[in-house]
Image (spheres, rainbow, N blue to C red):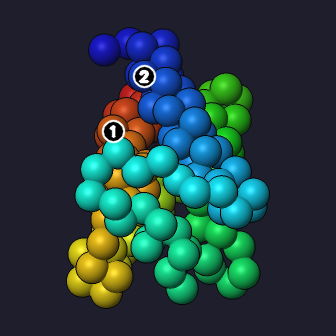
Amino acid sequence: MSDRLLRIGAAAVCLAGIGIAGYLSWARVADATVICVAGGGCETVQSSDYAELLGVPVAVLGLGTYAVILALIAWDAPLARLGAASIALFGMLFSIYLLVVQAFVIEAFCTWCVANDVLIAPALALLTALRLRS
């Protein structure tokens, strides 16, 4: 797979992440009800103590993370590739933590949150492959 295709794939995943995290951020800031497509756990998760980290909504952190990764993909220098892959690794670890919290602490799942958490895995794979090519 070429560098160009890896960058396009990673950018597409980041744009999807920005879309989901943007929606969740808007809902959190606007105090709007999240449209929950399955299970009804979205409001439970969004209103939990774990929906914020140091006063910042987790969705806003995700939005910022995907935006920074997208900017690093656009920059496309060796240091940017390392930074993007490193941030995606941290994001993946944080996403695993959030999934564990939803499963065992909150005991509810937000479909949007899970989708956003899962998106970081292909982003990490593509960014790692891109980093290893440089």
Query: Up-down: is 70 above or below 84?
Result: above
Residue 9: mark: 2
Would you call the spot at circle 1 few (<14 residues within 10 Å), some (14-19), or many (20 or more)? Answer: some
Structural distance between the alpha carbons of marks 1 and 2: 9 Å
Is any part of residue 109 visible from this angle? yes
On the image, which quarter does residue 93 sit in?
bottom left
Location of residue 114 (image quadrant): bottom left
Which of these two is toward me, 100 or 112?
112
Locate residue 29, reporting x and y percent.
74, 61
Question: Residue 92: x percent and y percent?
Answer: 39, 59
123 shown above or below 89: above
- Residue in view at x 59 percent, y 39 percent: 18
Residue hosting label 1: 122
Please name the residue shown 70% across and 51% down the image.
26
Give the answer, above or below, for where 82 lies relative to 8. Answer: below
Q: Which of 79 and 110 is in front in this view?
A: 110
In the displayed structure, 107 sits above or below 7; it is below
Which amino acid type is marked by label 1? Pro
What quarter of the picture does the N terminus occupy?
Answer: top left
Dots 1, 2 in contact, CB < 8 A: yes
62 relative position to 120: left or right: right
Say which element carries label 2.
helix
Instruction: Tell me the residue at 49%/24% (across/down).
Output: 12
Looking at the rendered structure, the kind of residue marked 2 is: Gly
Few, some or many residues within 10 Å of mark 2 (<14, 14–19, 20+): some
